């Protein structure tokens, strides 16, 4: 089973992007992992981590594209039952990918190589 198969198995079919975009996400995350770990390959032991980062990236892209669905409650007043909604702050694509990568830093550090 490869990363693409894992992503397809974990996400519902209606949430999957088209095949071409999905391949781009897999390659983008793979390149980020290789850059962070100073490697020219991705170890087999990281394939589930790779797939989970791709899934997180897909979900983050959905939130970025549909900010209206991502409103957050900014204040609640109980006396007259008043609820105020605000919007969540959107990250740039590069920053969000980097943030996702660092969520998995503990798992990635085991495979990191030193560079001289």
Image: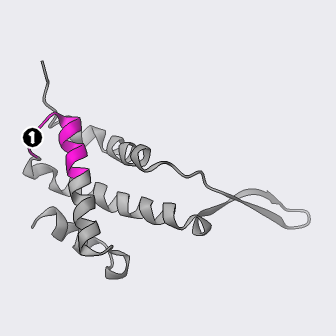
The one of 17 and 104 positioned closer to us in this rendering: 17
Q: Residue at x 29, y 59 (%)?
A: 54
Few, some or many residues within 10 Å of mark 1 (<14, 14–19, 20+)? few
**Circle 1 is placed at which residue position?**
40
On whether residue 36 falls in the magenta region, the answer is: yes
- Location of the C terminus by quadrant is top left
Q: Residue at x 42, y 50 (%)?
A: 93
23, 105: nearer the viewer: 23
In the picture, the quarter occupied by the N terminus is bottom left
How many numbered circles are shown? 1
Residue that appears at 85% across and 62% down:
78
Against 110, residue 77 (above or below) is: below
Residue 27 spot, x, y in % from top left: 21, 56
Over which residues does the magenta segment extend?
A: 29-41
As drawn, 32 above or below 86: above
Q: Majority secondary structure of the magenta segment?
A: helix
* Residue 13 shows in this picture: yes
Q: Is residue 87 magenta?
A: no
Q: Dot 1 lies on which element?
A: loop
Residue 107: image quadrant is top left
Q: Residue furthest bottom?
A: 14
Vertical arrangement, residue 18 with respect to residue 80, above or below: below
Residue 109 on image: x %, y %: 22, 35
73 with respect to 60 (left or right) = right
């Amino acid at each position: 089973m490869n990363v693409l198969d894992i992503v397809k198995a974990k996400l519902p079919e209606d949430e999957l992007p088209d095949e071409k975009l999905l391949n781009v996400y897999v390659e983008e995350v793979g390149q980020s992992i290789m850059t962070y770990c100073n490697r020219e390959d991705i170890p087999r032991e990281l394939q589930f981590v790779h797939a989970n980062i791709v899934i997180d990236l897909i979900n983050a892209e959905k939130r970025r594209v549909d900010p209206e669905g991502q409103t957050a409650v900014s204040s609640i007043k109980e006396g007259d039952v008043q609820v105020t909604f605000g919007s969540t702050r959107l990250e740039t694509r590069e920053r969000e990918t980097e943030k996702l990568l660092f969520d998995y830093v503990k798992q990635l550090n085991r495979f990191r190589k030193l560079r001289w």
